[in-house]
Amino acid sequence: MGNRRHFMHSMLAGAVALSAAASFATAAHAAGEPLRVATDATFAPMEFVENGKRTGFDVDLIDALARTMGRPVEWTDIDFKGLVPGLISRRFDVAISGIYITEERKKVVDFTVPYYHGGLVALVKQGNTAIKTPADLNGKKVSVQVGTKSVNYLRENYPKVERVEVEKNNEMFNLVEIGRADAAVTGRPAAAYYVKARPGLRLVEPALTTEEYGIAVRRDQPELTKALNAALEKIKADGTYDQIVKKWFGAAAK
């Protein structure tokens, strides 16, 4: 009996040792694997291309998170409307592109904790006196990017708006500048950045919504979501996150 108990104890100890070794090996393997990230780099200052290089707040954030996790980054550039379908089809693991956390999206993908506060805002020409408040958007031509929350938000809350749907974020602003749209509705960070860079445009206050950005993750990778949340907590604690915020928005995170 004693020998059997000793044998069972040895077997159990061996199993635990093997399990621990396997877990360590899996963790080590994951640490070296590329983090496959998709974005639509047309949403300055969150993500955009400058001098042929991908840059922006979200890009710096992912780079910092990946460094903390010990993983290189493998980027995929794709239209915004393809981000969620791409996650579902396992084309990549993570999507970051100024994506608002919504109940509809949470049905099909997971999100990290919010990493930045945003919201929808309207942008018009400086001399536009017909649109003084968001209520004035009804009856006007408003450009929006396909696949973004702006489309459904205007459909549901501003039924008299004539939506002009475009593929790329910068196309919305161009339509306002040349007079083919009366306003554009997009995320505040992008709108504020564009107004600063291109005089002659202004934001319509107050903002239409207050929302939160999250990193979207494949639903079959809950451990990755946890790892990203842990890394985000770490870079907030060590000051890296505040440095990124200051770089792109000029003020520390609140």
Image (cartoon, grey):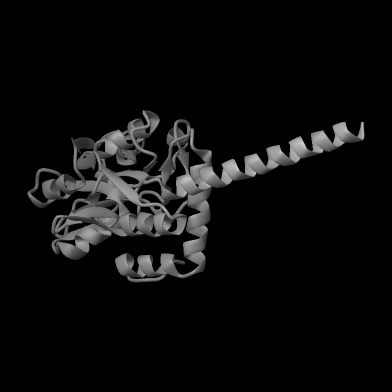
Name the spot of residue 112 as percent of width and height, x first. 48, 47
Q: Is residue 106 left or right of residue 182?
A: right
Q: Quadrant of residue 198?
A: bottom left
Q: Nearer the viewer, residue 5 or 80?
A: 5
Identified at 75% across, 35% down, the residue is 11
Pick out the residue farthest to the right: 1
Identified at 51% across, 49% down, the residue is 227
Q: Nearer the viewer, residue 105 or 5?
A: 5
Q: Does 247 appear above or below 73?
A: below
Q: Nearer the viewer, residue 19 or 242?
A: 19
Asked whether residue 98 appears in the rendered view, the answer is: yes
Identified at 36% across, 49% down, the residue is 208
Name the spot of residue 68 as percent of width and height, x first. 45, 59
Name the spot of residue 154 as percent of width and height, x first. 31, 38
Pick out the residue farthest to the front: 3
Q: Quadrant of residue 195?
A: bottom left
Pick out the residue farthest to the left: 178
Name the spot of residue 71 as percent of width and height, x first. 40, 52
Identified at 32% across, 71% down, the residue is 250
Q: Is residue 115 left or right of residue 14?
A: left
Q: Does 157 appear above or below 241?
A: above
